[in-house]
Image (tube, grey):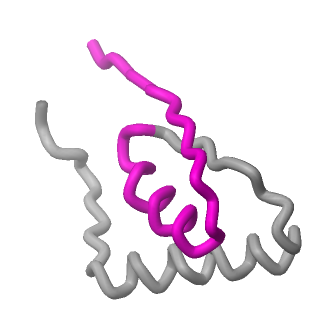
């Protein structure tokens, strides 16, 4: 499998900061009403884990997505 034509590398510090910022926004919008997180397995597990930890959520469900190119 070849690399995508356009790559957008993100440093870990920025990635962590953005995931925490998203969890902060989600916590302000719901006031503790989130019960679970649904994430896409290809690239979504790490952000889901960070957000789940920040929001105190223990249930993470996954969705597997596959795409095919000719």
Q: Is residue 70 above or below residue 1?
A: above
Instruction: Give the number of callouts.
Output: 0
**Farthest left residue in view:** 2
26 over 11 or under it: above or below: above
Locate the N terminus by quadrant: top left
Q: Where does the image place residue 62, in percent across and percent down from the top left? A: 51, 35
Q: Residue furthest top?
A: 70
Q: Quadrant of the C terminus?
A: top left
Q: Hey, which quadrant is residue 61 in on the image?
A: top right
Left or right of 28, for residue 20: left
> In the picture provided, is 36 more to the left or to the right than 34?
left
Task: Please state the horizontal and vertical placement of residue 4, each as a whole percent of the image.
Answer: 24, 46
Name the residue located 41 percent from the left edge and 79 percent from the top edge. 16
Magenta span of residues: 41-70
- In the image, residue 68 sits, relative to residue 18, either above or below, namely above
Q: Is residue 24 magenta?
A: no
Is 18 placed above or below 47 here? below
Report x, y in % for residue 7: 26, 60
53 and 10: which is toward the camera: 53
Give the residue displayed 33% in from the left and 17% down from the top. Answer: 68
**Between 42 and 3, which is closer to the camera in this rendering?**
42
Q: Residue at the spot x=87%, y=74% of the render?
A: 31
Q: Residue at x 46, y 59 (%)?
A: 49
Q: Is residue 39 found left or right of 35 in the rendered image?
A: left
Q: Nearer the viewer, residue 46 or 1?
A: 46
Image quadrant in which you'd find residue 64: top left
Residue 28's x, y, as percent? 82, 80
Whether 58 is among the magenta residues is yes
Residue 47 placement, left or right of 31: left
């Amino acid at each position: 499998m070849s690399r995508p034509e356009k790559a957008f590398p993100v440093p870990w510090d920025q990635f962590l900061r953005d995931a925490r910022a998203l969890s902060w926004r989600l916590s302000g919008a719901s006031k503790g009403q989130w019960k679970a997180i649904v994430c896409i397995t290809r690239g979504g597990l790490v952000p889901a884990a960070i957000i789940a930890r920040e929001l105190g959520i223990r249930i993470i469900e996954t969705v597997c997505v596959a795409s095919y190119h000719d």
